[in-house]
Amino acid sequence: MEYHPTSGQPTIIESFSVYGRADVAPPFVNNSPWLPFLCCAGFEFAELAHQAALSKEHMDKFLQLIWNVVDGHVKLTFKTHGDVSKAWDKASTQMTPFKKHVISVDYQKGKLDFDIYSRPLWDWAMDLLNQPILAPHLNGMLSGYHWWRIQSSLPNDGVPFAFILYVEKTHLLSYGNVKGYPVIARCTNLPVHIQNCTGAGGGRLVGWLPIVPKDAEEDHKLSYTNLKHIVWHEAFLKFLEIIILYSKTGFAHKCFDNVTWWLYALILLFLILLTFQQMCDGINMHCPCPICLVPSTKLCDRNATYPVRKVEDAQMRVKLYKENHVVGEAALKEQGLRPIQNVFWRIANSDPHKTISQDQLHALQCGVHSYYMHEEVKKLAEVLGRNALKQIDEQFDAFPQWQGFNHFHRVTNISFSDGNKFRDISKQILFASHNMLTKQKSKAGYMLLRCIASYLAVDMYVLLDTHTESTLAAGKVAYQDFLKHLDVYTNNEYIDVAGDSTKNWNFPKVHAGKHIFHDIREKGTAWNFSTRPNKKQHGPLKQMYLCQTNHKDIAKQLLQLDHRTLVSKLIGARIAHHDEQHLWELRDANHDNDDNPDDNNDPEDAANIGASFEGHIYLGSPQCPTTFADVEELQEYHYLKVHYESVVDWKLATDYLCCSPLFHGHERCDCALIRTHNKDGNDKNIFAWILFMFKYTVGDRCLELALVLPMDAPIGPRPALRAWPAASSEFISVHSIICGALLVPDYAHPD
């Protein structure tokens, strides 16, 4: 063995018997190999949590459970995975399980079999009715003219028992071709805040539809396209069999108050526009709207109103096709229909053209704005050069942060995102680009920003959860104004400056606004038929597929896991209800035994039931107090909660206002609308910038104050706000704050 000369080692010659048998090194002794962890068990727990990818929330709950067991507060009987599985199997019997069905469809000269999994929809509904924590919330009183007409058509002791169904294919992985076809149901007889939640009364996976596989040889044939539609409707027929029956006969049910009502099943809403492709001929047809018969060339027509679709007309055309294929085919093409018996025709009070609703998420935020307006802004800004793109990104980054509002460091590189982010981008884009896409620099860009401003007005009215005749009328006017600005933008001679004027703005989603306010009038509010709560339910399915299955026979495994999720939410809700009742009893008992009970309304106190606060304001995040002359004390606070009446839903809402020198690494001082007085002593509301919040205590008197900089300095005819000099800042009572205000700098006039 020859070593490098610089090593200083001599050449060694060894025989086979000793080669590779070096002297054994002395043993290494370490009595605390788990350091810097305090003990071996601590390291093993941390390693297991890391391998299981536990979140902070899950880890805290896991540790809390362990210490409750260690301290003897609770008893844990599980010893193996088998024990846990047996407990799940026993608990799963509390709710209706999934069943597998096989449907056979004729194709060419043979039959094709497809598997469908379903949780019997009516049985699932009865499970909800029989749950004590949900039964008191079930009622038959929903808003909207559509519901009113259905109720009027039933017997006096009849109650509509309605479902919302959401159907959309989803990729179970962000890569690859593994897809699922889940069906999610919600019971509309529950209040909206319950049916749209993720708890026991919220949306639930109730079915798994088959996907007709792609076939390179058959895919473009009309017969194979029809096969996909037939399979979809046959699968749904199996899924809705009992609903079809009870929609006509009703079902006698004794409620929790011992009153018997006849429940009439119906499909109130069928969500996602793309499902219309399964009912008709898809979106590339002569009449692509699922509600009216607007021609595909007139989707941007803001003046004309077209006839609504009628089930009787579609049935007549399908019947004509069976009698004469040539004549029937021509009649079907006129309305973009397929020669298929629509399964929803069989359900009473469930006209498919009335159950389909125009969804704000897909039609506006992920449609009109994301694919069209957002891309046009980027394109027109790019014409102005890279500096324009950079400045728009910088102004997005400088946009003030706000609770529940996504903050973006840059947007000009975003081409795909979720609807929530595109919604927030649309609200910020005007402020971040108005000094770039000016009338002088980019006439097309200026026209586009005017179009976006009118679009935001439509989006604002759709967002309202409580409507009046005036707001519905204003929403329709806003939509007409949007189409007018869109027409001006798409037909101006400056659009060619961007280098691409081929984008077709005559598409179905821009037509959605024509019906969305009618849908609101018919079905209450847009939140009633939003797909946003249902979209969230695809996430857990993808997570379960990735982490808890072997990627084989995925439908069976996913449905079993989802069933466990349903059972766990139900049991968890019962436990939470029990604990809440117990805490209320303890609180009442303590109140009765205390002659001078403290007024504990601290929302940060975990023992305070409801985690809410009474009154108008609450100061939070207290800092170390400063004492003066032993009788005065000043204590700074870094955030403020303010109750105010929201015009969105006419309910009490809460703003979270920050005034902190270090909020996620940056200074943040929010603005607010405050109540003050003018020089004549009359009430006056102004905007102000919060600089400092504190409590000042003198003896037994406590003042809750804020140092603010008023934003009502003279600015001339411009519709903007200007702050007074810093020397004009003043002290106010925090109780004079009405609500928070998100004020954005005018980048065109930084002074």
Image (cartoon, helix red, strand yellow):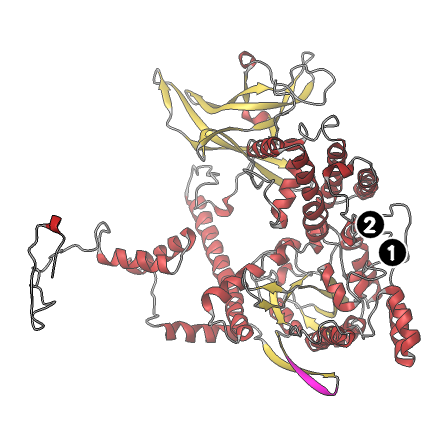
Question: Left or right of 693: which side holds 177?
Answer: right
Report the magenta stretch's main SS. Answer: strand
Q: Residues within 10 Å of mark 2 (few under 14, many from 20)?
A: many
Determine the secondary structure under disc 2. helix
Question: Left or right of 598: which side holds 741?
Answer: right
Which range of residues does the magenta coloring cover?
109-114
Question: Left or right of 425: which side holds 273?
Answer: right
| Rendered position, 615 above or below 83 | above
In front: 577, or 524? 524
**Amino acid at pointer 2:** Lys
Tell me, for residue 514, which label it has, or none: 2
Residue 384 percent across, percent down from the top left? 67, 32
Residue at 72%, 61% in the rendered image? 274
In front: 664, or 562? 664
| Rendered position, 494 above or below 238 | above
Quadrant that contains the N terminus: bottom left
Q: Mark 1 points at which residue?
A: 294
Is residue 122 in the magenta section? no
Q: How crowded is mark 1: few (under 14 residues within 10 Å), some or many (20 or more)?
A: many
Residue at 71%, 43% in the rendered image? 373
